[in-house]
Image (cartoon, grey):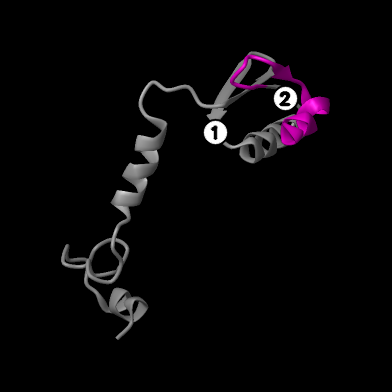
Amino acid sequence: MGATERCALADPAPAVPPNCHSPSEIRPKAAANKRRMDQVGEGQALAYKMIAERENETVRIERESTFIIIAKAKVWASEGWQVVITDKDGKSYPPEEFDKLLAA
């Protein structure tokens, strides 16, 4: 019996986990998640910061990946936000200069 069938047949008793999988079917990847968090470390600044502002709202996002921060910034800018990306050296890039980050 597959997970879907078991889930459909399961009564609401706590014996069936909310994801309808037994603990032996899908194992959590806590070790991989912990390792990733250890690489960044607490209190350590990430390489890129994006600040998006519109009217009286401000959103700040920090990422290590150039591609991810540029993608996020382009989405925010396309929604009408004023967006600036700052690199780890403190240099700011407006939307028309985002491609310069890829060349670096």
The residue depicted at 16 percent of the width and 67 percent of the height is 15
Number of numbered tags placed on the structure image: 2
The residue depicted at 35 percent of the width and 50 percent of the height is 32
Locate residue 93, reporting x and y percent.
Answer: 74, 21
Q: Secondary structure at mark 2?
A: loop
Q: Quadrant of residue 91?
A: top right
Tell me which numbered mark, 1 or 2, is placed earlier along the sequence.
Answer: 1
- Considering only vertical position in the picture, is 41 above or below 90? below
Locate residue 8, reporting x and y percent.
Answer: 32, 76
Mark 2, residue position: 81
Which residue is outermost to the right?
96
Specify whether residue 98 is painted magenta: yes
Which residue is outermost to the bottom?
1
- Considering only vertical position in the picture, is 71 above or below 4? above
Relative to 53, 40 lies left or right: left
Relative to 74, 61 lies left or right: left
Relative to 12, 69 lies left or right: right
Q: If the image is split into quadrants, where does the N terminus sit?
A: bottom left
The amino acid beneath tag 2 is: Trp
Q: Residues within 10 Å of mark 2 (few under 14, many from 20)?
A: some
The answer to which of 21 and 85 lies nearer the viewer is 85
Locate residue 52, reporting x and y percent.
Answer: 66, 22
- Considering only vertical position in the picture, is 69 above or below 51? below
Specify whether residue 66 is painted magenta: no
The answer to which of 74 and 6 lies nearer the viewer is 74
Q: Quadrant of residue 84?
A: top right
Q: Residues within 10 Å of mark 1 (few under 14, many from 20)?
A: some
Q: Which residues are magenta?
A: 86-104
User: What label sits on residue 64 in the rendered view?
Assistant: 1
The amino acid beneath tag 1 is: Glu
Q: Nearer the viewer, mark 1 or mark 2?
A: 1
Q: If the image is split into quadrants, where does the C terminus sit?
A: top right
